[in-house]
Every structure is written in structure tokens, then in C-alpha cells.
């Protein structure tokens, strides 16, 4: 059996709005290899975020199968899905979504705290190292309100990586940043995930952003219209 | 345009948030309902008394009543014949002045009503000159109740009765019935039924009207009357009053009948004021609830307000929109409250009536007088206070610029900065509260008749304490929440810490929620501490001073000590019973002193000194005080009397006696909790030198150490039965333990309504917690959504909300108990003392405090259940994307 980080088989997602049914995703089948950096492109509202949410075990498909590292998520209960999110997934959002009441280091430590597997000291070391890697170690005790957009996204990347997930899901990570900051963030994301061999699935509608990916998938009106043949994973920048 | 916006922006939102809207309406409704219920009950009581006074007075416009004696000699009437020679109002030679004697007494219904319910209802008995009385009072007969012959009422033991009483006990013309009169049972025959119109409606119809001579015979008061009613031309009243005042002894008062109403009003004012004040508590907590709801409503919709402002809606329109929202909530909540208030008032009337009958006036209060003015006032208060409570958040909504409104958390960041300023203002308000608590009561005039004292500065101090507590809460939370966060992290894990941090991040909303709970708990704690301390003080006083082994009262004696006398000859019979060491025949009756009601007591000081005990406020021994009183021919007074009339030990107290005003030195002031009106107590020999009344209201019997109280009680009953003079005597004989128990039952009954009020205040506070939790969950949707993305499970999110609920409960408990303790000190040492004149020792009701702490925690956590479930179900993608 081929080992995929992510594999989708005929996945559909239909939202019911009263009697009206909206098909957000239609018969999506795809696979992503471990360590691959894949860009998911398409116009706003085409279903990119929905797809990320399904893969990220935030939402369940209406039909079809989603396999994360060969585990069928449809057979997992809430606890199983939660465990999957805690251990396998890291999320980066367009609007950073840092908790305003927590400091930088507390925000980054949050996934570890929720998983509850590490001691305070271990967490402290892991968080400090990561913030050092994203260049935010000088702002450990700052609150998000005191950071720039680029800084917030770097913290968000550190948070997504802190529990060493196998898969990073990034939803328009540069959508709220200027070009320069956007590039910095993507370079960071690419560098860190490659160092750790992590798989990245990034939703974006920016061609510049997509250039950082090994391959691009395009969605339009809920359908996968362009599934480029996976290219060999580049190991260098 | 504004109407459309109101419907779409406000009404639709209220409808969408049904639970929160419902909780808010319930909170306002409860507050208004309590306020209305208490005021309707108070109003019903007062209007019943006033109505009775009006009906009994009829056309009387002047009256002579005993002031410092129990009754007067009817021979006085012969000295009033000069009135017959007064010229008429227009100078004619025919006098238009009339007068008639009255003997007013009370009796007790001895057993069951027609539905077999046990009752000891107090029945008012009036003896009047039946030949002359129709000129004074209105007699209206029930359809079948008119006497066949006017003369039957003059027959022995015949009487008219009120229609309501006849219905209650199944009586009709010609029926016979029995009443407890003093220490005997008398049998009377109904000679006519008076309808509810006119005098028959007085005292709720519980009235027996008989000819004066029949009444005098029935009550064994030959030749005695308790009032002379006058009907004189209005213009001649000043002249007649002057002449009567000069002519009649100082022991009698010449007054307008309305004065009695004013006196009853004044007598009940302290009790009723306190109830009214307590009833405001729920409304106050309700105000916090509305403040809470409106604040959250405004915070939640700041971005929308920003959009509206950006689209050109004026500040004024935004202000009006939210004002209309508050108004709508206020109107709906108040209407619910008004309906609830009328329902609750029926129960409140019963409770108020029980207390008033036990402590003040032996007159039943029934029915409910739904006064439109009070209903209108309740509406104005409910809606008005709702709008007042909402003004700050409304102003907040209207004042923000479009750019600011669209920014998240700008309100909270404002609160973070404001908290230090609020702390200083709060401390300043606290100082003002302390200064207010040191001020004396405020004296004000009630009508034309007398002045009254109200602890207005005490009430102000209470409000300022609450305000100070509310203002310092943000700062207190900023200290406590980080501590709690660390503590919870160690004990309950990281989610618990996150909960604490989330509360800290929303310090504005958290402060409002905690403040609502604080007020509810503070009220509960302060009232419990006050009542508990009062109860313990009374228990200690009862144990120290009620030392008589047996307490003997005539069967007709009621708790308010106004009615029923004992034949003193039975004291002699009892004194000879084996095992009896001493008997103190104590006489007590209400008098008028300096225009106020008080009680005059007459006792055997030798017996009290040897067997009993009084606690004098300066700690002096009873025997020393009584020795001095004996030598100086003085008297003692109770603390409440001393405080009300500014009398101190060593002062001279002037009493009007039949031989003129006499000054008596005050030998001591002692603690007494039996009557807030206060007592003047004189030694019997001294009393008898001036007053001609050698009777007793009750007997305190002290036994020898070997005697058994049950045995002696049996022997007393046997001896009285075997004695020709006392064989028909009916007595209540209570042992010391029974009496003490009864005192405590009366105490607990008196405070029953207070317990109910503070329970409701807590319910309203818990509604505030629930409301706040809903709001917090709604406000934290995005955070919960993010947490789900970061790996938080349903159970973890549920736990977080439950921890938040628990923390609100804990913070409410901490702040509420602190403020409650301060309020309790204020209630005990200032408000209660200024209202009732009682010194209460502070006792900490630890058991209650622990119970209420647990109750609040449990309720808070329980009230978090639904919000926790809601939080766990939040669709993460939607809420995160929406941001």
C-alpha cells in the first residue's frame, strides 16, 4: 500500500441551508506525499478552506473517505479526531488567530498545553527554541496586540509547529500581509517544514505564494480541476 | 427609518438571543415583582387600618382617648354638658355639638371556623351608646341581617356582628357564639348582621358591636370607657379642643381621629421602611442584570454599530436605538413583574399581616388593595431604572467612532485602562460610605402630627458601599485572576488557566457579572448575618432575662400585648401552690408618650431583683438598679424607648398621671427585644400611688429549685378549678421552655418575609451569572473555535466554560461576602439601631456562610452547563472564518 500523508477518495461536502443544499466540495480525490508542500489554489469561495477543514478533522465530509497517514478519519469519534488534531495537525490562519489574552510564548505553548503530554520545563524549552527559529524570541512576553502582522504570523507558524505535527494546514497565510512580510513568512514556513520533513497543504489564491509549493492543486466551484502530477520533493531552497 | 432599524437591528437580535433576552426579562420581572408585592402588602395593611379607623370614626371629628392610662371613667361624660349650651355654627341657640362614649376592646375567637380550620382570630369589640350612635357611625344591614326589633341589642349578651365574620363562622341572626374575653369565655347572641358597608366593614368585618353596658358587663369594666367621640361644627373645633384640654386630666388626649391613623402609620413605618428597602435589593440586582445585558449587547455589536455609523447613522440615532432596546426590555420585564407582583403580594400580605399582628396591632389584614398609583409607580420604577442602568452602555455605544467600533476589544482595552481610575473613585466612595454611616438618623414630619426618624444616611451608606465594591471590582479581579490562573493551572490543568485568562481578557464583562453576583451574595450574607446576629442576641437575651419558670396569661391575650387582663386575685391562689417561690403580676398596656406609641409596664421589682434578671446597658446589676429606683421613686426604660425618646439614665421622665404630670428619675436603661416601641417600667407600689389600676396582664411564676414545672402547672389548674372565684378562669400557662420557644417562633415568623426576599435576590443574581456566562460564551466563540483548531476537544471546552462559571461563583463569593460583611455591620450597628433602637451583638453565622458559599458555587457551576454545551458545539470553521 502506498503511504500518503493525506489521501482523499471521492470526498463530498454538502451544506444544508433549510431546504436548499449547497455542494461545497464535489467528488474530490487527491493524495499528498509525506514532506510534500502543496498549494491549493482557486478563487474565493471555491472550497479551499472547506477542504482544509475536512483534512484538518475540524469538519466531517458528507461522503467519501479521508485518510491521514493511512488512518480513515471517518471511523474516528470526537475524541479520536481531537487526538488527531492535537498530534498530527498544525494550523496557520490568514488572520493569525492568536488569543489576545495570552502572551506570545503562551500562545505558542497552547497546543502543547491542550495535549497535556509535556512538563512545564519541556514545554518552555520547545517553545523558546521555536520562537528563536522564527525570530520572535525577543518578544516572548508580548501580547498579540503589541505585534505587527508579520510578527503575529511568525508566532502563528511557531504555534502550528510546536507539537511537531506531520501535516501543516495553512489557510491564506499571507492573505493579510504585505508582499515583503508575506515572502518572509512563506520562506520561514518552507524552511522549517523542510527541516522537519513536514507535509504542507496551503490554501492561497496568490500565484507568488504558490511558487513556494512543490505542486499546485486548483479547485473551482468545489471541484478539483487541476491536479498536477506530483513533482519530486525538492530538498533545497 | 429609525423604526425599521429598531425592528431589524434590535428586535431581531433580541429574538435571536431568546435565552439571554428571557433571562433579562425574568431578572427585571422578579425585581419589579418583589418591589411591587412588598409595597402592595404594606399599602394593603395601612389602607386596611385607615379604612377601619374611618369606618369606626364615622362622622366623629374629635375624640378623647386615654394617653397614659388604660381607660377612663364614664362619669367624665357628665362634665361635658357644657357642650350642649354652645351656640350653633351659625349662631343659633341650638348646640350642634354631640358626643358619645365608646368602649373598645378585643376578644379572641376560641376555635374553628365553619370550614373546621383552627383559628384564634382577634375580634374587635366595640361598646357604644346604641341610642345615639347612628348619628356618629353608618349602620348598614346585610340583606337578612336587619334585627326584627331595635331593642334586642339591649338584651344581655346580645350584639351585632360584621357580615364577613358571620360568613367565616357560619353565624346568622339569632345564632349564639363564644369568645375568649380576658381570662374567661363568654357566650353572645347575634342580634343583627352588619353589611360590609359602613361600620360592619371595619377590621375586615371581624367586629362585634354591642351596647355600651353590655360591653362593660362582658369585659367586666363597669363604668369604664376607652374613648369619647365628638361630632362638632368644624369651626368650633379649636375652641372645643382648647377647653377640653384644659378641663380634662392630663392622662387623656384630645385629638382628631385622623391622628390615630398617623400613629399607626408611624408605628409601622420602621418595619415597613425596612421591608421596602429590602424589596429594592432585587430591583438593584435586576439593574445590574440589565446593565450586564446592555453592556454585552453593545460590546457584541460594536462592529455593526461601526458599520451603521459609517453608513451615515448619527450618534443620536445609535443612542436612541439602544435606548429603545433598554426601554423595550424594561417595559416587557416590568409588565411581567407587575403581574408577578400582584400574585406574590397575596403571600406578602399574609406574611406582613402575621408580623404586624404579632408585633404591633392586633388587627387582621386580608384581601389585597391593588392600588393603581403603586402599579403606576412600579411601572415607572421598573422602566426608569432599567433605562438608568442601561445608560452607561448606551452612551458607550453612541460615543464610539466608526473606526473604533470596528476594532475588536476596544471596549475591553478601555476597561483595562479605566480600572485604576475606577479603583481610586471606588476608594473615595468607600470613604463617603463610612462618613455617611456615622451620621444620625434624619428626622422628618409625618403629616401634622408627629415626627419620625429614618436612617437615611444608613441607606445611603449601604448604596455607597455597594457602589464602592462595584467600582473596585475590575482592580480586584486584575489581582485575583492571575493568582487564580496559576492556582488552577496547578490543580485543574491548563484549560482552567486558560479560562481564568479568558475572564481576565474580558475584564469589563467579567466585572459586570461578578458585580451582579456580588450584590446578590452581599445582600444574602448581610441579611443572614443581621438576622443571625439578631437571633443569637435574642436567644441570649431570652436565656438571661426570661427566668420565670411558668408564664401565665389570660386565654385571650395576644402577642402584641394589647388585650386581655387577669384578675389579680388568682395571683394569690397561685402563690399558695406548693413549689411556687414567687409571683410577679406584670401589667402592661400601650400608652402615648410625646405623641408616639409606647408601652407602660408595671412590675414587682423585688421579685424581679430576687428571681429574674435584666441586662442593663451599662452592665449594672439588676439589684443595684432596683435598689436605687426604689429609693429615688423612679422607673426603668428599655433601650429602644431610650433611643427613640432620647432618654438616658439619670434623666427625669415626666408622665401624665391622674393627678397631673409627675417626673420620675430614670434609674437605668436595659436591653429588651420584645417591642420596638419600647417600655417604661414602674414598680407596682409607685404606680398605684398615681394610677387606679391594680390588674395584671400576665404572671411570671418562679418556682423553688425542687419544684417540677409540669407538676406545678397541673396543680395551678386544679386549684383554680376548685376555687369558686376562679373556676371559670381560662389561662395559658407556658413553661419557661415553651415560652422561649414561642418567642423564637415569633422571631422566625417575623423574618420569614426577609428570608424570602434575600432568596429572591440570590435568584436574580444567579440569573445574572447565567446571563453573563451565555454572553461570555457568545463572545468567546472565536476563541473556542481557534482552540478547536489547535486541538481542544469538546470535553476540554466544556470544562473551560464550567471552570469559568465556577470562577465567577468564587469571585462573586469572595467579593460578595466581603461587601456583605460590611453591609451587615452597617445593618446591625447603624440601620437597625436607628430604625428599631436595638443593640445587636455581632455573631458570625459560619454554618450559613459555608452553606451559602457551597450553594452559590453549585448554582454557578450548574448555570454553566448549558453555556458549556453551547460552547462545545460551536462550529469552529464558521466562527473563525467570520472573524
Image (cartoon, rainbow, N blue to C red):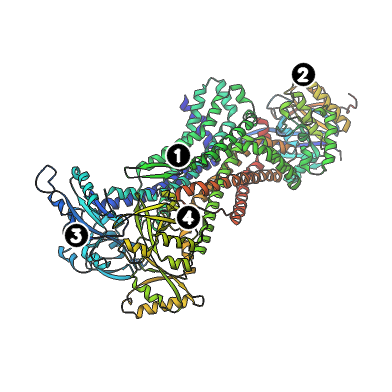
User: Closer to the N terminus: mark 3 or mark 1?
Assistant: 3
Q: Which mark is residue B751?
A: 4
Same-chain status of marks 4 and 2? no
**In front: B77, or B828?**
B77
**In front: A146, or A11?**
A146
Q: Residue at x 53, y 38 (%)?
A: B435
Numbered disc in front, either 3 or 1 = 3
- For label 1, the residue is B382
- For label 3, the residue is B129
Numbered disc in front, either 2 or 1 = 1
| Residue count near mark 3 (Cα–Cα under 10 Å), binned few <14, some 14–19, many ≥20 | some
- Whether residue A37 is situated above or below residue B523 in the rendered picture: above
User: Secondary structure beneath disc 1?
Assistant: helix
Q: For residue B725, what is the image quadrant?
A: bottom left
Numbered disc in front, either 3 or 4 = 3
- For label 2, the residue is A179
C-alpha gap between disc 3 and disc 4 = 42 Å
Numbered disc in front, either 1 or 4 = 4
What chain does mark 1 sit on? B
Residue that protrudes farthest toward the bottom in the picture: B722
Amino acid at each position: 500500500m502506498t503511504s500518503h500523508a493525506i489521501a482523499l477518495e471521492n470526498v463530498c461536502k454538502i451544506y444544508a441551508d433549510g431546504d436548499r443544499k449547497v455542494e461545497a466540495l464535489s467528488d474530490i480525490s487527491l493524495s499528498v506525499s509525506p514532506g510534500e508542500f502543496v498549494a491549493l489554489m482557486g478563487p474565493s469561495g471555491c472550497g479551499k478552506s472547506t477542504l482544509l477543514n475536512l483534512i484538518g478533522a475540524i469538519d466531517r465530509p458528507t461522503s467519501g473517505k479521508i485518510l491521514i497517514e493511512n488512518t480513515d478519519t471517518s471511523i474516528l469519534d470526537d475524541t479520536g479526531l481531537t487526538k488527531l488534531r492535537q498530534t498530527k495537525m498544525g494550523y496557520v490562519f490568514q488572520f493569525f488567530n492568536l488569543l489576545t489574552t495570552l502572551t506570545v510564548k503562551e500562545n505558542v505553548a497552547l497546543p502543547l498545553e491542550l495535549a497535556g503530554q509535556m512538563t512545564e520545563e519541556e514545554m518552555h524549552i520547545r517553545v523558546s527554541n521555536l520562537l528563536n527559529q522564527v525570530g520572535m524570541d525577543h518578544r516572548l512576553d508580548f501580547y498579540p496586540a503589541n505585534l505587527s502582522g508579520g510578527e503575529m504570523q511568525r508566532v502563528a507558524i511557531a504555534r502550528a509547529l510546536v507539537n511537531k505535527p506531520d501535516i501543516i494546514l495553512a489557510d491564506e497565510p499571507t492573505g493579510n500581509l504585505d508582499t515583503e512580510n508575506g515572502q518572509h513568512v512563506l520562506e520561514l514556513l518552507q524552511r522549517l517544514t523542510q527541516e522537519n520533513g513536514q507535509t504542507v497543504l496551503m490554501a492561497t489564491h496568490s500565484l507568488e505564494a504558490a511558487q513556494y509549493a512543490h505542486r499546485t492543486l486548483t479547485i473551482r466551484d468545489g471541484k478539483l480541476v487541476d491536479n498536477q502530477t506530483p513533482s519530486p520533493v525538492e530538498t533545497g531552497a | 427609518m429609525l423604526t425599521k432599524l429598531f425592528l431589524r437591528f434590535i428586535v431581531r437580535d433580541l429574538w435571536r438571543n431568546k435565552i439571554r433576552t428571557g433571562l433579562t426579562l425574568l431578572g427585571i420581572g422578579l425585581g419589579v415583582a418583589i418591589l411591587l408585592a412588598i409595597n402592595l402588602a404594606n399599602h394593603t395593611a395601612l389602607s386596611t387600618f385607615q379604612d377601619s379607623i374611618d369606618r369606626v370614626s364615622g362622622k366623629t371629628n374629635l375624640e378623647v382617648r386615654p394617653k397614659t392610662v388604660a381607660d377612663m371613667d364614664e362619669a367624665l361624660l357628665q362634665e361635658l354638658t357644657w357642650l350642649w349650651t354652645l351656640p350653633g355654627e351659625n349662631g343659633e341657640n341650638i348646640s350642634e355639638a354631640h358626643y358619645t362614649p365608646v368602649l373598645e376592646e378585643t376578644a379572641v375567637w376560641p376555635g374553628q371556623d365553619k370550614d373546621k380550620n383552627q383559628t384564634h382570630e382577634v375580634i374587635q369589640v366595640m361598646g357604644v351608646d346604641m341610642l345615639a350612635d347612628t348619628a356618629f357611625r353608618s349602620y348598614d344591614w346585610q340583606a337578612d341581617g336587619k334585627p326584627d326589633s331595635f331593642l334586642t341589642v339591649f338584651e344581655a349578651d346580645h350584639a351585632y356582628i360584621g357580615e364577613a365574620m358571620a360568613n367565616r363562622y357560619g353565624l346568622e341572626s339569632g345564632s349564639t357564639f363564644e369568645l375568649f374575653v380576658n381570662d374567661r369565655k363568654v357566650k353572645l347572641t347575634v342580634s343583627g348582621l352588619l353589611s360590609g358597608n359602613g361600620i360592619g366593614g371595619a377590621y375586615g368585618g371581624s367586629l362585634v358591636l354591642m351596647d355600651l353596658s353590655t360591653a362593660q358587663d362582658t369585659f367586666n369594666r363597669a363604668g369604664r370607657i376607652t374613648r369619647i367621640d365628638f361630632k362638632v361644627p368644624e369651626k368650633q373645633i379649636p375652641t372645643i379642643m382648647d377647653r377640653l384640654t384644659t378641663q380634662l386630666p392630663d392622662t387623656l388626649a384630645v385629638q382628631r381621629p385622623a391622628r390615630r391613623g398617623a400613629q399607626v402609620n408611624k408605628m409601622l413605618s420602621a418595619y415597613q421602611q425596612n421591608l421596602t428597602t429590602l424589596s429594592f435589593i432585587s430591583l438593584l440586582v435586576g439593574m445590574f442584570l440589565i446593565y450586564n445585558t446592555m453592556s454585552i449587547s453593545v460590546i457584541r455589536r460594536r462592529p455593526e454599530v461601526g458599520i451603521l455609523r459609517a453608513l451615515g447613522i448619527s450618534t443620536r440615532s445609535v443612542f436612541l436605538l439602544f435606548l429603545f432596546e433598554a426601554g423595550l426590555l424594561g417595559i416587557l420585564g416590568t409588565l411581567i413583574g407587575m403581574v408577578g407582583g400582584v400574585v406574590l403580594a397575596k403571600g406578602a400580605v399574609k406574611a406582613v399581616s402575621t408580623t404586624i399582628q404579632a408585633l404591633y396591632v392586633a388587627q387582621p389584614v386580608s384581601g389585597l388593595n391593588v392600588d393603581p398609583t403603586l402599579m403606576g409607580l412600579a411601572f415607572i420604577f421598573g422602566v426608569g431604572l432599567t433605562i438608568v442602568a442601561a445608560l452607561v452602555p448606551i452612551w458607550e455605544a453612541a460615543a464610539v467612532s466608526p473606526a473604533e467600533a470596528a476594532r475588536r476589544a476596544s471596549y475591553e482595552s478601555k476597561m483595562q485602562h479605566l480600572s485604576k481610575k475606577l479603583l481610586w473613585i471606588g476608594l473615595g466612595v468607600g470613604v463617603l460610605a463610612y462618613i455617611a454611616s456615622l451620621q444620625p438618623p434624619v428626622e422628618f414630619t409625618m403629616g401634622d402630627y408627629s415626627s419620625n426618624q429614618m436612617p437615611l444616611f444608613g441607606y445611603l451608606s449601604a448604596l455607597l458601599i455597594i457602589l464602592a465594591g462595584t467600582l473596585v471590582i475590575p482592580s480586584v479581579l486584575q489581582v485575583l485572576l492571575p493568582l487564580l490562573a496559576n492556582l488552577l493551572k496547578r490543580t485543574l490543568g491548563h484549560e482552567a488557566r486558560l479560562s481564568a485568562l479568558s475572564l481576565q481578557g474580558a475584564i469589563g464583562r467579567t466585572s459586570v457579572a461578578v458585580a451582579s453576583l456580588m450584590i446578590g451574595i452581599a445582600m444574602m450574607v448581610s441579611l443572614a448575618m443581621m438576622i443571625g446576629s439578631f437571633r443569637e442576641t435574642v436567644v441570649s437575651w431570652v436565656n438571661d432575662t426570661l427566668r420565670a419558670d411558668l408564664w401565665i396569661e389570660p386565654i385571650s391575650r395576644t402577642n402584641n400585648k394589647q388585650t386581655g387582663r387577669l384578675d389579680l386575685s388568682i395571683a394569690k391562689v397561685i402563690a399558695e401552690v406548693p413549689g411556687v417561690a414567687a409571683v410577679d403580676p406584670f401589667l402592661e398596656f400601650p400608652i402615648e408618650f410625646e405623641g408616639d406609641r409606647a408601652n407602660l409596664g408595671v412590675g414587682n421589682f423585688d421579685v424581679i431583683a430576687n428571681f429574674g434578671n435584666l441586662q442593663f446597658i451599662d452592665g449594672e446589676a439588676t439589684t443595684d438598679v432596683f435598689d436605687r429606683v426604689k429609693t429615688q421613686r423612679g422607673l426603668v426604660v428599655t433601650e429602644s424607648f431610650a433611643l427613640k425618646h432620647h432618654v438616658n439614665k439619670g434623666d427625669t421622665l415626666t408622665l401624665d398621671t391622674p393627678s397631673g404630670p409627675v417626673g420620675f428619675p430614670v434609674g437605668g436603661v436595659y436591653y429588651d427585644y420584645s417591642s420596638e416601641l419600647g417600655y417604661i417600667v414602674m414598680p407596682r407600689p409607685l404606680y398605684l400611688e398615681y394610677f387606679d389600676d391594680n390588674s395584671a396582664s400576665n404572671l411570671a411564676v418562679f418556682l423553688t429549685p425542687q419544684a417540677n414545672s409540669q407538676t406545678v402547672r397541673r396543680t395551678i389548674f386544679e386549684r383554680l378549678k376548685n376555687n369558686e372565684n376562679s373556676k371559670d378562669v381560662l389561662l395559658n400557662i407556658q413553661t419557661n421552655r415553651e415560652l422561649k420557644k414561642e418567642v423564637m417562633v415569633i422571631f422566625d415568623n417575623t423574618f420569614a418575609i426577609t428570608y424570602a426576599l434575600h432568596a429572591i435576590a440570590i435568584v436574580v443574581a444567579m440569573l445574572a451569572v447565567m446571563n453573563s456566562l451565555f454572553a461570555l460564551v457568545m463572545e468567546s466563540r472565536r476563541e473556542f473555535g481557534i482552540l478547536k483548531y489547535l486541538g481542544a476537544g469538546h470535553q476540554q471546552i466544556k470544562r473551560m466554560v464550567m471552570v469559568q462559571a465556577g470562577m465567577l461563583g468564587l469571585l462573586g463569593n469572595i467579593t460578595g461576602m466581603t461587601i456583605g460583611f460590611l453591609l451587615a455591620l452597617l445593618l446591625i450597628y447603624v440601620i437597625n439601631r436607628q430604625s428599631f433602637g436595638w443593640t445587636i451583638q455581632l455573631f458570625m453565622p459560619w454554618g450559613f456562610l459555608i452553606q451559602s458559599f457551597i450553594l452559590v458555587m453549585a448554582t454557578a457551576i450548574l448555570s454553566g452547563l448549558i453555556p458549556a454545551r453551547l460552547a462545545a458545539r460551536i462550529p469552529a470553521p464558521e466562527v473563525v472564518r467570520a472573524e
